[in-house]
Image: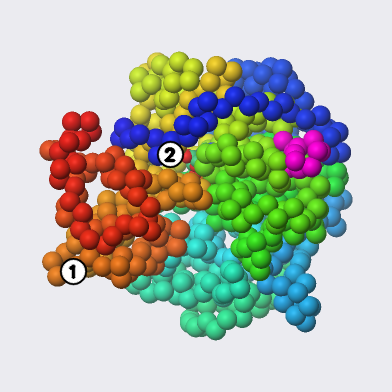
Amino acid sequence: MTSHQPERDIDSSLHEDRVFEPPAAASVGSAPWHVGSLTEYEAEHERSVKDPAGYWGMVARRLRWMGPYERVLEGQFPDARWFTGGRLNACDNCVDRFVDEGYGDETAIVWEGEPELSGGGSGAPEVRRLTYKDLQEQTARLGNALKKLGAKKGDVVTIYMGMVPELVIAMLACARIGCPHSVIFGGFSSQAIADRVVDANSRIILTCDGAWRRGKVVPLKDNVDKAIEMMGGQSPVEHVLCFGRCHNDIAWGSPDRCWQEEMAAASDDCPCEPMDAEDMLFLLYTSGSTGKPKGIVHTTAGYLLYTAHTARLVFNLVPDAGQLYWCTADCGWITGHSYIVYGILQNRVPTLMYEGAPNFPAEDRFWDIVERHKVTHFYTAPTAIRAFMKWGEEHPRGHDLSSLQVLGTVGEPINPAAWMWYREVIGGGSSGKQPCPIVDTYWQTETGGHAITPLPGATPTRPGSCTRPFFGIDAAVVHADGSECEPDKGGLMVIRKPWPGMLRGVYGDRERFIETYFSTVMIDGKPVYTAGDGARRDRDGNFWIMGRIDDVINVSGHRLGTMEVESALVAHEAVVEAAVVGVPHEIKGTGIAAFVTLAKGHAPSESLKRELGEHVAQTIGAIARPDQVRFAEALPKTRSGKIMRRLLRDVAAGVDGQQDTSTLEDFTVLAKLRENDE
Ligand code: WTA
């Protein structure tokens, strides 16, 4: 791990002293708080960390098991295993158990499509409601359709779909028949699909013809076709099952099957496969410091339990209390996996899915959805909140948001101004009502679920702090030697004991798993989990995340490796060398600045900048498009040949992307001046 300065300086929050006490439950909704005071939280946290087996054994009674486990926890980092010997199925815990318990006709998913064209162009949005029975039938049919295509227990199935209910059905159907899923975000490129499909050796891809985004069709099936072409002889793909959503023109080749036809032909009798507690439930690729994205492995029992329990306590979910929960993430990210699908469905609270963009057809779309559906729980990212602020208060003010009870944020540090706006404008604080509590949830793809977060009825909150560790999380801020940092001093964010939702590996790369997470900090000679974030803890025990300390940048709450972007750039014929750094960005939190040196025969120009930006977007996905592309004579390096990233960061942060010129920059003088500090 390199010793970079934290990616994002949240200096203003270092002096944040506003504290907001949790509201009384009666003032925000009808359900009582599961955890109602800080004292209760503290006692329970202490117990959960001292006796993880006792604590999680108690919570595990909430799962529906098909066979008993022998031990709650076996082994330690990096190889802790949970509920060994136990048998259960994830789809059963999200769907079938509720049908068996008599809730089959209740709504599990409320879905709203993006286009407002249905109803003969009347502008009425397209809404679908799926009950637990619907999900049971659909996952069973799809499970059988997958089996017909040759899917066997343990085979990784790739899912590359838009935000339609069929995406959730696809995930759950895989779980139903014991096939781990690998969901790829629909905004990723063909190259990204190819890399992930090859790495996972996935023979089946589930996709859509297209996805709606701001009134246009994203050609998902075309992207899959291109990915298969790119893989050439390396392609493991045998079948592509395509759901018709947009009815755009698509090519139809020999591996292609029509979703709707296969479903109609399949039987709806497909029992949930009993899985071992530690069988892989899914793989999810995420960016790291080096190389290509890695497949983070999550297993069945621990992940299910951890997501259900965090969702229940952090959002205060209660069935039959009129709650409607909405997370605005895409299922292609861990937030969607844990808190659109698994954590929420297990709590028998309906989960709302929205297909499209927040500003289509207008900038009040989200608030219109909250008002029409009476959303009670709303979970989004700071980058979205900053965009809402910019679009103007009139949009939320024009809607009745009084149904809201708990607000959440995730993905990146939230600046205090955005936090306050969220509380006042969305949470109703400025209307004189008791504002909704805000839960700023810090976690990662690797943690499976919330790691550090307030509990809405228990934890006093501070704008910009994710506050306290969740139950069972033994979090600390430490020096490289493992000793704890003094209050208010920055250090490395670590977790010292295993927790049920933790990743179990990096797919096919044991070395990378150990190297990335369990080699940086040792305590008493034993490895602890290193998150890759810088943090500090204040005198009251609250955590403040300072941002990534590795070569990962967090763009609009989405993780990208600087090296991925650099590799994409050097693959362009005009580029010899590239260095990519994060740069503060008003809306995205962190934007991307790329410094490149050009090959002979290529001259700096505005059009080349655009071309390089487009090239990166094509290679990885639009989220990776650099905000600044700058041409350099040479990249500034130390005598030992290391690129001086800190210098580049300062240079990038010092200019407005709009104003920089397309001429070559010469960093040699600056580099010489700086060499001593690197
Ligand atoms: C960052 C997303 C500050 C952090 C769930 C982490 C946050 C990375 C927060 C993981 C938060 C996430 N406050 N930073 N509340 N939540 N992060 O894997 O840098 O996509 O390491 O998981 O996002 O991103 P990932």
Q: Is mark 1 within 8 Å of ligand 1?
A: no
Position of 284 compared to 163: left or right? left
Pick whichever, 400 or 542, lies toward us.
Answer: 400
Does residue 32 sit above or below 320 in this rendering? above
Residue appearing at x 57%, y 34% in the figure: 464
The colour scheme applied to this rendered structure is rainbow
Q: Give the x, y percent position of residue 211.
A: 58, 70
- Identify the amino acid type marked 1: His
Residue appearing at x 87%, y 50% in the figure: 102
Element type at marker 2? loop
Residue 56 placement: quadrant: top right
Query: Dot 2 corresponds to which residue?
Result: 8
Residues in magenta?
427-437
User: Is disc 1 surrounded by few (<14), some (14 to 19) or many (20+) residues within 10 Å?
Assistant: few
Task: Find the residue positioned furthest to the front.
Answer: 659
In the rendered view of the protein, which quadrant contains the C terminus?
top left
Pick whichever, 160 or 558, lies toward us.
Answer: 558
Residue appearing at x 77%, y 30% in the figure: 23
Does residue 491 sit above or below 111 in this rendering? above
Does residue 676 sit above or below 575 in this rendering? above
Element type at marker 1? loop
Label the magenta part by its dominant secondary structure: loop
- Is residue 520 a member of the stretch shown in magenta? no
Query: Dot 1 corresponds to which residue?
Result: 602
User: Is disc 2 surrounded by few (<14), some (14 to 19) or many (20+) residues within 10 Å?
Assistant: many
Does residue 557 sit above or below 316 in this rendering? below
- Identify the amino acid type marked 2: Arg
Q: CA distance from mark 2 to mark 1?
A: 34 Å
